[in-house]
Amino acid sequence: MKSIAVPGFGFLELENVILDLNGTVTEFGDFIPGVLDYLKALAAEGFTIYILSGDTRGTLRQSFEHSPGIEAVVTKTAQDKRAFVESIGPQHTVCVGNGNIDVEMFKVARLSICTIQAEGATTRAMLQADIIVTHIKDAFEILLDSKALIATLRA
Ligand SMILES: [Mg+2]
């Protein structure tokens, strides 16, 4: 659990990191270099990490079976993603995604980050997010650096 007081935004008590797969931690089907190291760093900070995907290729769980602290969850729709976030405690969850399928979970999560990078982000996802980054590495960096998070969120 990471506890951060943000003036004008409130108190954050974050323990779950939810990541969309396609376009968020992968680009065109391949993991973005460095992502797995960031996930390990977040797990070492005490975050529980969930990767949510429709798993079109059927390989989602295998990809993370040797990664302690990272759980792969099959979700087919925006409502599935939202329901999963609601089931683990949205007040303690940060969601990262890029597409329309992420909009519903962005609505309920305490903190939502939209990433653009290679595959782009939808305007609906961007408008629902608290923070927009151009690359997933920047999302990880601000989650690992509370001062950066505060500087961006404070009002
Ligand atoms: Mg996506």
Image: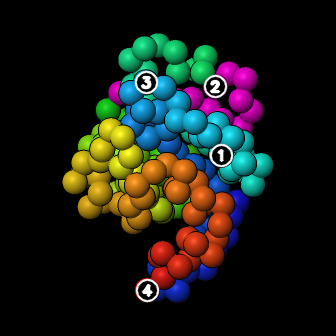
Where residue 9 appears, as percent x and y from the top left, is: 47, 79
Residue 102 badge: none
| Label number found at residue 64 | 2
Disc 1, SS? helix
Q: Residue at x 55, y 71 (%)?
A: 149
| Viewer-closest of 81 and 125 | 125
What's the residue type where badge 4 is placed? Ala
Instruction: Please name the residue shown 47% across and 76% down the image.
Output: 153
- Report the magenta residues as a range: 64-76
Q: On residue 29, which mark appears?
A: 3
Mark 2, other Cα within 10 Å: few <14 / some 14–19 / many ≥20:
some
Residue at mark 4: 155
Image quadrant assignment for residue 144: bottom right
| N-terminal-most mark, 3 or 2 | 3
Point out residue 120 in the picture as x, y percentages from the top left corner: 30, 44
Mark before the other along the chain sequence, 1 or 4: 1
What is the spatial separation of the Cα atoms under label 1 and label 2, in whole angstroms? 14 Å
For discs 3 and 2, the disc positioned in front in the rendered view? 3
Mark 1 lies on residue:
38
Count the marks: how many?
4
Q: Residue at x 58, y 36 (%)?
A: 33
Decide which of tag 3 and tag 4 comes sooner along the chain. Answer: 3
